[in-house]
Image (cartoon, rainbow, N blue to C red):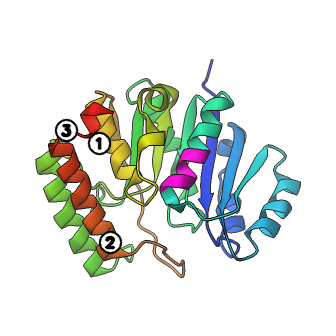
Amino acid sequence: MQPTVFITIPAYNAGATLERVFARLPEAVRDRIEQYVVVNDGSRDDTDEVLARLKLSYGNLAALRHEVNRGYGGAMKTLLGHALEHGAGIVIVLHADGQYSPEKIPELVEPIERGDADMVQGSRMLGGEALAGGMPLYKYVANKTLTAIENLAFGLGMAEYHSGYMLYSRRALEAIPFHKLSDSFDFDLEMIVMSKVKKLRLKEVPIPTIYADEVSHLKPIPYGMRVLSVVWKYLRGKYHAL
């Protein structure tokens, strides 16, 4: 019996892009999805109206709402908690801005379904085409620099740690105390760190790099400082104590 698959989407001011993300889902993927879960994380645009339209076409869409913005990690805690509570076997994290290709879901979910991985990250750097896909040079250099530091600290040998295209098995979500992790954009990195601490199997799968007219809410310098803070806390044993 195949595990139930949930797609979870954190949405902050995503009214202009969210419908396009749903439209790009392959038909074969739609047939597998038990529930789509979107949390409107305190948006100030028409995200609620867009979700109401989407629910007319997707009867298995659960629209959650934070009255006040809780940050990316705060939104992810709500989404992952909901998915666990409602019986998800595999949880796919898509972003509402369209940067992460829904078309790659069949390849990304495969290692978990085969029993080869507990977590999967869609990696933009693994295929070696990040710059050709439009990643700005400063982001590319920052990504490579931070990844080198992280590989030294964590010993995982990953191509990158900074893609938010993540997939989790139920086993991983039950093992990781994700409610104790960051409310900000370093949440995904902390999940990867916890996979090392909990001895979970993490696999990278290459994905295309897509940069278009989306608006990023991630501020590079504060994010970089948060990454270095995660490295420091890991070396001091904070994550091992969770």
Q: Amino acid at mark 1?
A: Val
Quadrant, the N terminus: top right
Front-lying residue, 226 or 49: 226
Check disc 3 and report the residue beneath it: 237
Check disc 2 and report the residue beneath it: 222
> Is residue 137 positioned above or below 144 on the image?
below
Could you tell whether 151 is left or right of 126 in the image?
left
> Is residue 16 positioned above or below 79 on the image?
below
Q: Which numbered disc, 1 or 2, marks the residue closer to the eye?
A: 2
Q: Return the residue found at the far right.
A: 56
Task: Find residue 205 and name its label.
Answer: none
Span highlighted in magenta in the image: 73-78
> Which secondary structure lies at badge 1?
helix
Mark 1 surroundings: few (<14), some (14-19) or many (≥20) residues within 10 A: many
Does the stretch in magenta take in 23?
no
- The mark nearer the N terminus, 1 or 2, is 1
Could you tell whether 8 is left or right of 167 in the image?
right
Task: Find residue 193 and name its label.
Answer: 1
Q: Amino acid at mark 3?
A: Gly
